[in-house]
């Protein structure tokens, strides 16, 4: 199993990173700075902008505390904080792509990322191409002289294929392309993208860092080569997040390690149990030894989070909907990473390469912090309803 690249324990780092209490009279938590205007002591300081904070869009002690905590976890040179996970995808793409460039995106990417590429990026004159999640080193054959970005997400949204990220990064770097990775599933606790050759690590902090289904936020962390360009684009776009949301995510980080441990244990227990259920054809969870990419996951990741999918044994939308409608504890709602369990029907109609075949309809489960036996009973209700549909 991979280590997380840092000798201090995860929970110790989560408890103490980001801010120094003695900067603010010893208060343990940083202040929530609501700011647009920052005053300068005189005209020459104003003209030179020669002070740490210059305007609300360009950082405050609150955003710095979260950015520094994320840098410590990611091993990055700098982190920007944006108002949603989707903005954490779109801002770096706008920072590094121009008309005439080519981007390779994994076919199993989060759907709104694909939508942004197919609409906005194409309109701006970027050539968009999708690659198979198992491309690995063979992605070299798709890289063109104008390929500027390879965009990965691993494990895949909804179908959980694990990519050979180091091999992809090696191939991309040979021609000077940069690699971005949506690392929301693992969080920097279970996978540190920059240690595996990725240049820019992206998180929907809405999920595990926030952890309570009440905040939208995104973080983008860059290595030293990419930091300046990312940061300049962030300033140019004025895409800054509100201070209360930033504070809530820093607060969430403090308990993310213990929450994730619980999500991990419960999700694995349920995944193993589901493998033995007669109505289930497959469980798509990379920490299961039966998963086709288990060896790559084990090589690169140091843990697994709380979201995976199941494939029902036969049937179609009727069985899928019957399963979902029978659930009493799992809510039917998008997003994940909160304390509560959720289920969604998986739609693969947008895929060009990674679309199966699967033996039946797919359902994605986010395993929350409830008791495992209660969740199993709820899933059994779903399986019985699907079998009867
Ligand atoms: C993998 C992944 N990336 C990004 C996002 C976007 O996050 P947000 O909901 O904060 O925009 C999501 C949301 O579901 C996601 O699943």
Image (cartoon, rainbow, N blue to C red):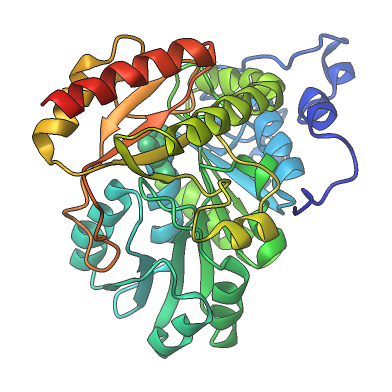
Quadrant assignment for ligand 1 = top left
The image shows residue 156 at horizontal and vertical percentages of: 42, 53
Depth check, front residue: 157 or 171: 157
Depth check, front residue: 351 or 28: 351
Image quarter hosting the C terminus? top left
Relative to 90, does residue 277 appear above or below in the rendering?
above
Relative to 223, does residue 342 appear above or below in the rendering?
above
Is 238 displayed left or right of 191 in the figure? left
The image shows residue 28 at horizontal and vertical percentages of: 81, 12
Is residue 9 visible in the rendered structure shown here?
yes
Give the image quarter of residue 118: bottom left
Is residue 52 visible in the rendered structure shown here?
no
Q: Residue at x 44, y 75 (%)?
A: 135
Depth check, front residue: 304 or 313: 313
Number of marks in the rendered image: 0
Relative to 264, does residue 120 appear above or below in the rendering?
below
Q: Residue at x 23, y 73 (%)?
A: 125
Q: Residue at x 32, y 63 (%)?
A: 107
Q: Residue at x 29, y 73 (%)?
A: 129
Depth check, front residue: 97 or 328: 328
Relative to 262, does residue 236 appear above or below in the rendering?
below
The image shows residue 88 at horizontal and vertical percentages of: 45, 45
The image shows residue 228 at horizontal and vertical percentages of: 61, 60
Give the image quarter of residue 123: bottom left
């Amino acid at each position: 199993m991979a280590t997380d690249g840092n000798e201090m324990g995860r929970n110790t780092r989560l408890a103490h990173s980001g801010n120094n209490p003695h900067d603010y009279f010893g208060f343990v938590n940083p202040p929530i700075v609501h700011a647009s205007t920052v005053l300068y002591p005189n005209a020459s300081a104003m003209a030179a902008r020669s002070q740490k904070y210059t305007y609300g869009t360009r950082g405050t002690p609150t955003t710095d505390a979260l950015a520094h905590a994320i840098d410590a976890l990611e091993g990055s040179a700098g982190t920007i904080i944006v108002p949603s996970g989707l903005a954490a995808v779109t801002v770096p793409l706008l920072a590094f792509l121009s008309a005439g460039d080519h981007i390779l995106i994994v076919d199993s990417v989060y759907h709104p990322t694909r939508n942004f590429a197919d609409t906005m990026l194409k309109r701006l004159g970027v050539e968009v191409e999708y690659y198979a999640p198992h491309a690995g080193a063979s992605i070299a054959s798709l890289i063109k002289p104008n390929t500027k970005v390879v965009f990965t997400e691993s494990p895949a949204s909804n179908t959980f294929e694990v990519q050979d990220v180091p091999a992809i990064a090696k191939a991309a770097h040979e021609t000077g392309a940069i690699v971005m990775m949506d690392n929301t599933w693992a969080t920097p606790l279970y996978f540190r993208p920059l240690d595996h050759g990725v240049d820019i690590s992206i998180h929907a902090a809405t999920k595990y860092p926030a952890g309570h289904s009440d905040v939208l936020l995104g973080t983008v962390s860059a290595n030293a080569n990419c930091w300046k360009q990312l940061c300049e684009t962030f300033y140019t776009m004025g895409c800054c997040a509100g201070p209360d949301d930033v504070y809530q995510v820093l607060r969430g980080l403090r308990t993310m390690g213990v929450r994730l441990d619980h999500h991990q244990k419960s999700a694995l227990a349920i995944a193993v149990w589901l493998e033995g259920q007669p109505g289930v054809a497959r469980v798509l969870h990379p920490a299961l030894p039966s998963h086709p990419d288990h060896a790559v996951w084990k090589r690169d990741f140091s843990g697994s989070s709380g979201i995976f999918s199941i494939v029902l044994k036969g049937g179609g939308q009727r069985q899928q909907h019957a399963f979902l409608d029978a659930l009493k504890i799992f809510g039917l709602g998008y997003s994940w990473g909160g304390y509560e369990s959720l289920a969604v029907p998986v739609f693969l109609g947008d895929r060009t390469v990674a679309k199966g075949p699967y033996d039946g309809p797919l359902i994605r489960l986010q395993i929350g912090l409830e008791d495992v036996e209660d969740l199993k009973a709820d899933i059994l209700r779903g399986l019985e309803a699907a079998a009867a549909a």
